[in-house]
Amino acid sequence: MTDRRFDVIGMGRAGVDLYGEQIGGRLEDMASFAKYVGGSPCNTCIGAARLGLRPAMLSRVGDEHMGRFIRETLEAEAVDTSHLKTDQERLTALVILGIQDRETFPLIFYRENCADMAIDPADFDPAFIAESKCLLVSGTHFSTPQVDNASRTAMRYAREAGTGVALDIDYRPVLWGLTSRGLGEQRFVASDSVTAHLQSIVPDCDLIVGTEEEVHIAGGDTDTLAALRQLRLLTDAVLVVKRGPMGCVVFPGVIPDDIEEGIKGPGFPIEVFNVLGAGDAFMAGFLRGWLRDESYETCCAYANACGAFAVSRHGCSPACPSWDELADFLETGSPHFRLRDDARLEQLHWASNRKKDWPEVCAFAFDHRSQLEAIAERHGRDNDAINRFKRLAWEAARDATPPDEAVKGILCDGRLGQDALDAATGRGVWIGRPIELPGSRPLQFEGGDNVAATLREWPVEHCVKCLVFYHPDDPEDLRLEQEARLRTLFEATRKARLELLLEIIPPKDSPVDANTVARALQKFYDIGVFPDWWKLQAPNSDEAWDNIAKTITLNDPYCRGVLLLGLDAPEEVLGAAFTAAAKQSVCKGFAVGRSIFGAPAEAWFADDIDDDEAVAVMSGNYSRLMGLWRRQRKTV
C-alpha cells in the first residue's frame, strides 16, 4: 500500500474545544477560554500530520466561523480536507471544558444535532477510502443510526479496498445518552446495549485501542483480561490497552493469563496536568509506527511519548508533538517532571509546529509613529489624518503587484493605524505590529508595563514586532534592564500564541564591527529569547552576514529568518543591500517603510496630492522594491 495517497483517514468528531484558562477552579468560575480544534479523530489527524504521516479528515462542519476555523486549522496542519463537508443546516460541535484538579476535568458537550453527527454515506465513495492505508473510526460515531450507517459503510469500503481499519473505542457515556449532560467527563457506565453495539463492530477491525475502562465496555466485563479474551473471540485485531502512567500493553495474538505478559510499553515519569486528549495523541503516535511496520515496542514508545506530551500541556491537538520533538525526547528525555517547564522542549515544540510557512516576506512598513506625527505637526494635521494615511498605505500594499513568489506583508501599529490593521487582518498577508514605545531606551512598551495584558487583545495572526536600541557592550545595568524586558515580552508572546519579531539597532555613534550584531543576537539566545524573526540593518560586510547566519543557525535552526530594514535609504542603496542579502539563505526578505512612503507622505499631508495619487505612488514604490528583491534573489 505504499502508493496510496493517504496514510490515514480520520472519520468522526470534528468540533471546537473551548478550554478554561483558569487552572484549579470549577467550570462555573472560568473567566476566559482558549479555542482549539477538538474531536478525537481531528486531534489524531493533526498529531499524525505533525509526525510526518499523510492524514485526511472525513467529517462535517457548520457553515459558520467555527467550521471555517476547523477547516483552516486542519489545512495549516497539512491535513487533507477534501472530504470535510460543510453542512448548511447544522452548527459545528462545541465542547467547553476545564482543569479543576488532578482528577477532575469538567466537560460539557454541545452536540445536539451538530454537523459531524450528520455524516452520510453520500459524503464519500469507495475510491476515497481506497486512497488510504488506514481508516480510523471512533466509538462515538456508532452511537446513532445516522453515523452508525456512515461508519459501517466506510468500513465496508475499506475491507473491499484492502484498507486497514483502526478503532479508537473513544467511549463517552454522555454521548450514548447514559448520563446527564452535565457529566461529560464521566468515563465509564456499564451498558449491555453499548457493549453489544461495539461487539458488532470489532470483527471488522485490524487495530483496536482503548483505556482499560473502554476495553471493559467493549468486552462486556470489568475484569480487563476477561474483556480482552471476549474481544479476542470476536476479532483477530491487534488490541492495545492504554494504562495511563503505566504506559500501554499490546496483544497481537492470544491473551495471556497476566496482563503484564503482553508487549509492554512503559510510561514516562512526568506530571499529569491534563488527561483530556492524551488518548488522541497516543493514537497518532501508535499509528506512526504501526503504519510503517515498526515493532510493537517502537509503536508503544511513540504512542506513550505523545501521550506524555499531551498530559503535560494545555489543550489537546496543540499539545501533540512534531516528529523532531518526539525523536528528541525519545533520544535525550527531559530532566523536568513537569514537561511544560522544559524550556528547550517547549521551544522545539513551538518552533517545529508553526502553522503557516513564510518562506519569504516583502513587507511595507508603516508602523512609524513619531516620524508621521512630526510630518503631521509640520502641516497642521492631527492623528486622525495619520490614521487615514495609514489606511491609504494599506490600500497601496493591497494593490501592489508582487513578482513571482514574493509574499506581501505589512508592519502597522494599532494606536495610529487601527483602521489599516482591521482592513488587513484576515486577508492572508503577513502582519507585524509594534509593541515598543517609539525611541525608548531603555526599552518601554507602548501599552504599559503589563505587556501580557496588552497582547491578550491582539489577533493571533499578528506578529509582535519590538525595536530595541541595543549594543552587546552597553553599560551592564542598561543591558540587563533591556534584556529583562525582552525576556518578559518573549514569555508573554508565547502565552498569547503570537510570533515575535525582534528588531535590533545599535545606538547611534556606537562602535560596530563584523561581530557586533551577531554578539547581540547571541546575548538574547543566552537568556532564552528565541524570536521567530529578526529585523536587522543591512550588515556592512559579507563577514558580518556570515556571523549573523552562523549565530542563528547554531542557536535556532527553526528561526523564520531575517528581514532587512530600510532606514529611509534610497532605492540604489537598498539595491546594494539586497544584492548582499540575497546570497544569505537566512535572509527572507525586507520590511521597508520610509523609502516607500516618505515622499508621498510629505506631499499628502501638505495637500499637494490626493488619496488616489498617494496610493498610486506608494503602490508603485512598493512594487518596484519587491521586484528588485526578487531579481536579486533569482540571481543567486
Image (cartoon, rainbow, N blue to C red):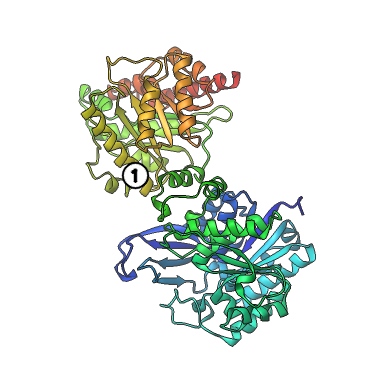
The residue at which mark 1 appears reads as 491
Of 465 and 288, which appears nearest the observer?
288
Q: In which quarter of the image is residue 135?
A: bottom right
Q: Could you tell me residue 251's position as x and y percent?
A: 67, 69
Q: Could you tell me residue 416's position as x and y percent?
A: 28, 36
Vertical position of residue 582 compared to residue 245: above or below: above
Dot 1 amino acid type: Glu
Q: In this view, does 599 lie to the left or right of 144?
A: left
Vertical position of residue 462 compared to residue 618: above or below: below
Residue at x 54% of width, y 76% of height: 213
Q: Could you tell me residue 424's position as x and y percent?
A: 42, 40
Q: Could you tell me residue 194's position as x and y percent?
A: 59, 82
Q: Is residue 43 visible?
A: no
Q: Helix or strand or loop: what does disc 1 sit on?
A: helix
Point out the image quarter for the N terminus. Answer: bottom right
* Furthest residue toward bottom: 192
Q: Residues within 10 Å of mark 1 (few under 14, many from 20)?
A: some
Vertical position of residue 476 compared to residue 101: above or below: above
Of 578 and 121, which appears nearest the observer?
578
Q: Is residue 346 visible?
A: yes
Q: Is residue 547 left or right of residue 585?
A: left
Q: Quadrant of residue 141?
A: bottom right
Residue at x 37% of width, y 24% of height: 519
